[in-house]
Image (tube, helix red, strand yellow):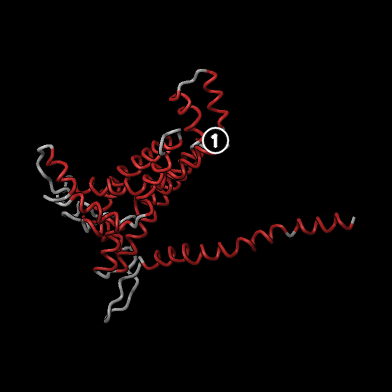
Amino acid sequence: MRQSGSVRRFRGADPVIAWLLLLPAMSLLALFTHYPAIANLVHSFYSTPRASHPSKFIGLDNYRNLVEDPVFWQALVNNLWYALGTIPASIALALLMAIWVNGRVKGRGILRLAYFTPTILPMIAVANIWLFFYTPEYGLLEQFLGWFGLAGHNWLGSRDTALPAVMVVAIWKEAGFFMIFYLAALQSMSPQLAEAAAIEGASRWYFFRRVTFPLLMPTTLFVLVNAVINAFRMVDHIVVMTRGGPDNATELLLYYIYEIGFRFFDSGYAAALTMVLLAILAAAALLQFGFLERRTHYQ
């Protein structure tokens, strides 16, 4: 009876112990995530403090300026195109690479290393490598096109090709990172599934479509969330390669926030732009979890 009472007392303390264990992580999350977001929201309703003009409450003026700002709309459209171009391509390429190196391929260890190498490189280094590829006249890409007698092109200096060119850099950088998660998920699957499908005479495509891909949905959801975040936060290569040019053709939303906040020192307007970015990411997260969670199959 005494032992039973002590067990009941211990079980009654379980919620308290759980909250105490969560307290450090929750404190860091609140301090470095929730508080900055709330402080930024408050700051977006105030003007930028100057030497002779302290910050004052201006209501929605920063948001009105945002609606009337053509550069903001250009950056938003560019970022949406950037996301549509990089997210599906990087995820599809990562899945194809994972399936390939998961099979019985000669030198698959070297292939895995080669695919993962861009991930461990700093984005600044990657941007400089690709800047050499895209350099007019003597860049590697220009040399390759010259072998076939094709005319050269200023890939980063043209409005039509600048944004696709930086998209290629992001896809090359991210696909190897996403491949690791798909590869881990593929190796955790039971080989008996493939054996049973082979006995039933199922084709490889049918097995992938009906078995493999549904079981990869938890990984796909995780990768998709990370890909969406990266599409709106990755601006290192923009700083090195184009600085938003030519004529704002590669101006992305986070880079525009950086310019407003740290180049033009308009912190109030930068806070309003940041709230728009946070709202976009929150809406994308709700859509992903609301739409894909019901289609996710957990083993």
Q: Which of 110 and 65 is in front in this view?
A: 110
Q: Is mark 1 on a helix, strand or loop?
A: loop
User: Can you see residue 25?
Assistant: yes
Q: Give residue 27's position: percent from left, percent from top.
A: 55, 65
User: Residue, x 43% and y 66% (percent of image)?
Assistant: 36
Q: Give residue 250's position: percent from left, percent from top.
A: 22, 52
Q: Which of 27 and 73 is in front in this view?
A: 27
Q: Give residue 152's position: percent from left, percent from top.
A: 11, 44
User: Residue, x 31% and y 69% (percent of image)?
Assistant: 267
User: Residue, x 46% and y 62% (percent of image)?
Assistant: 33
Q: Give residue 126's position: percent from left, percent from top.
A: 29, 54
The residue at the far bottom in this view is 52
The residue at the far top in this view is 201
Mark 1 is on which residue type?
Answer: Met
Q: Nearer the viewer, residue 19 or 141?
A: 141
Which residue lies under the disc numbered 1? 189
Quadrant in the picture for the N terminus: bottom right
In the image: residue 280, left or right of residue 260? right
Quadrant in the picture for the C terminus: top right
In the image: residue 128, left or right of residue 287? left
Question: Based on the displayed image, in which of its 4 quarters is residue 86 positioned?
Answer: top left
